[in-house]
Image: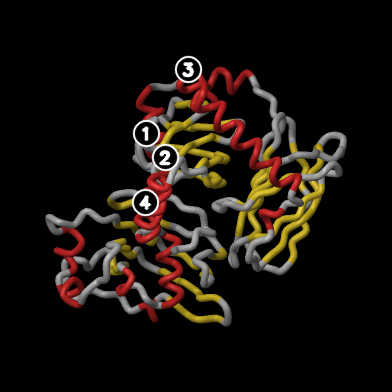
Amino acid sequence: MKIFNKRLMLNRYIMRFFLHLIFWGFAITELKSQQIVFGQITDEIDGTPICLAEIFIANSTIGTITDDSGNYQIKVPVKGAFEIVVNHVGYLPVVLKIDNPAPLHKVDISMKTNELTEIVVTARRNYRQRDVSVFWNKLLGERPSSRRIEVLNAEKVYYFRNSDNVLKVSCKEPIKIINHEMGYLIWYVLDSFQHDYNSGSSTIFGSPYFMELIPEGNRQKTNWEKKRKEVYNISINRFLRCLYQRKLNENGFLITKKDSVWYANTTFPLDNILQMEQDKVQLKIETPLLLACISRPVTDQMILNTWDTLFGPNSFFPITILLPQHIYIYSDGTYSGMLKIQEYRNSINGLKSRLPDDYEDM
């Protein structure tokens, strides 16, 4: 009964959210923005308009729905590249990346019907409990729970482990997740997931959409704000904003070469990887770098003793590997290109540690 009531409450919350978009003329898109995307959503087979299709900007809280003619318009809350995600009951979700920032983007999208094939039904049966754990730990950063981060439609996720010991996971609808610690309802459109048990490597591609929940009181609101601030302090988005400003150490981030951390004073000159270009910064990394997300200012003493700072007995903060790459970073922490990072210690990539790109530090 408790689970039923919780789902009923969330369904009502979602319905109110989209009704709000209808009656207030898509007012949620009237936010500070650098780009506008518009177009029409239609059926791939007969070309008929699809009304009430849900459209959102991935990694944000910004969404809208199509009108009776399948048309939409939405303001993008980021300066860099973004993904537009389209969802409608009975159709496969569509994810389209716009990698070149511009004032206007006309994007017309045709949607395919969502048919459950016999292969998918068979694949659903071929998995182990270990496979389930691997997937949720990679996606969320931990196993789902009713108190911290909860999955409402886990039964819709399909698992398949082939003869090469490679796990593949799919879901024909957005995965609905509640982050109880930060107060978000998240719709996650899973594009693909693969984990190779032979090499231990995983790849996951997907797009989250964040909806802020309504707190039950001031105490819960304060707890949510505190947790969001804590997560933001060590987030990749904040790191990129600080990198754009060239203010890493004072904001709790330390970069060093992966193969030289045992040497003293191994701080890494940012001029080696950054170049300013008008309204953006070019980031070019040729050899892997370690990024320590310490969340407190990095002192000269910490730099002089880099090994102890990163791996000493009191070092529990996340460390991430910045792989070789070439991207462009904007002042709001968004970017163009593909950000290539790899977990090293204490993941900050899972949804339990993710904030929308339009989150503003208060």
Cα gap from disc 2 to disc 1, whole angstroms: 6 Å
Which label's residue is closer to the chain start, 4 or 1?
A: 1
Q: Of tags 2 and 3, which is closer to the observer? A: 3
Which residue occupies 53% across, 35% down? Answer: 176
- Say which residue label 2 marks: 180
- Say which residue label 4 marks: 227
Cα gap from disc 4 to disc 1, whole angstroms: 14 Å
Q: Picture coordinates of residue 172 (x, y %)?
A: 61, 31
Q: Residue furthest left?
A: 313
Question: Which quarter shows the C terminus?
Answer: bottom left
Q: Is residue 71 visible?
A: yes
Callout 3 amino acid: Met
Which label's residue is closer to the chain start, 2 or 1?
A: 1
Cα gap from disc 2 to disc 3, whole angstroms: 19 Å
Cα gap from disc 4 to disc 2, whole angstroms: 10 Å
- What is the secondary structure assignment of the residue under circle 1? loop
Local crowd size for mark 3, using a 10 Å CA cut-off: few (<14), some (14–19), many (≥20): few
Colour convention: secondary structure
Give left or right: position of 124 versus 39. left
